[in-house]
Amino acid sequence: MCPAGGAEQSGRGYDPVKLAEGLRAVVCQGLRRKYYRFRGGRWYGGIATADCVGCNLRCVFCWGWPARDAPRETGRLYTPQEVFENLKRIAERRGYTQVRVSGNEPTLCWEHLLNVIELIEGANLKFILETNGILIGSNKGYARDLSKFSGVHVRVSIKGASPEEFHLLTGAKPEAFELQLKALENLLNYGVPAHPAVMLSFSEARNVEDLKSRLASIDESLVSEFEEEYVFLYPHVVKQLRKAGIWPRVAYYPDGIPEELI
C-alpha cells in the first residue's frame, strides 16, 4: 500500500476495498476520526454537515479532493461526542432536523460512525449517510449494523452508469462498480431506507437505461427514487477535470445549480 493510503495500481485499476484498509491507519485512531470542517448548508432543505477526511475512491470530479489527497496533513481527530456536539449546535442554531457526514467517505472509520449515529438518534435528529457504498457492498455486516437505527437514510452515490464509466471516473478496477449495487441490495435486505444517487454528467443514455434495469431487478423503489447527480464546477473541481483530460457532458456552475438538485 502506498503512503497515506495512496491508490496502489494493479491491472486495470486499484482495489478500493484495499485502499480503505490503508487509509484507516491515517484517518482513524480508536474511536476518533479526522474531520476538517463543520458547517450548515442548503442541501436537503437545510442540513448540518461534518466534513471528514479520507476516501477510498479517486473521482476526477470530487469537490473534496484537497482533503482526500492529503489525509495526513488535513484536519484533526474528533471523538464521536465532539462530532455530535458540533452537528447538534449547528442544527439547533439554524433550525435543522437533519445532519450528515460528508466531504469524503464516512464509512472508513466504522465504529466511530456508528457511535456518532447513536448519539444523533438519541437527539431525535435524522442522519443522512452519504457513501460510495463500496464497503457496505463488500461486507453486509455494515448494513446489518445500520438496521438497528430508525433515523438513518442511506444515499449511495454511484459513480457513473456502467463499470467502464466507473473506471474512467474513479481509476478503480471496473468490477468494483458492482459493490455499489450490492450495497443497495444489502441495505434493502436489512430494511435500511436507501436510494441511489447516480453521477450522470459523463454517462451515455444507453448505459443509464441499462443501470435502471439492473436497479429494478434489485427493487423497483430504486428506480422510482433514482436521484440524478451532476458535476458542480467549483474552481478546484475544474482544475482536477482539466488535469484528467475529462470534461462532463452536463455540469453546472455553483451559482447556477437548479433547485431540484439542491
Image (cartoon, rainbow, N blue to C red):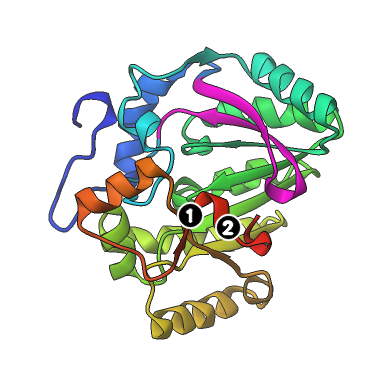
Up/down of 66 relative to 228, above or below: above
- Report the disc number at residue 253: 1
Q: Which image quadrant for residue 124?
A: top right
Q: Is residue 170 visible?
A: yes
Secondary element type, mark 2: loop
Q: Is residue 2 above or below residue 73?
A: below
- Identify the residue shown where x is 75% and y is 25%: 90
Q: Tell me residue 133's x, y (percent).
A: 49, 51
Q: Report the disc number at residue 220.
A: none
Which residue is at the far front?
255
Task: Please state if 41 lies on the left or on the right of 156 as rendered.
Answer: right
Tag 2: amino acid:
Ile
The image position of residue 161, as x and y in percent, is: 42, 71
Residue stretch in magenta: 34-54
- Can you give x and y, in whole percent of width and height, for residue 237 in the image? 37, 46
Residue closest to the far left: 11
Q: Is residue 173 left or right of residue 229?
A: left
The quadrant holding residue 22 is top left
Mark 1 residue element: loop
Q: Are marks 2 and 1 in contact (CB under 8 Å)?
A: yes
Q: Nearer the viewer, residue 185 or 105?
A: 105
- Identify residue type, mark 1: Tyr
Q: Tell me how far mark 2 sits from mark 1, CA to CA.
A: 6 Å
Q: Is residue 121 magenta?
A: no
Residue in view at x 69 percent, y 15 percent = 81
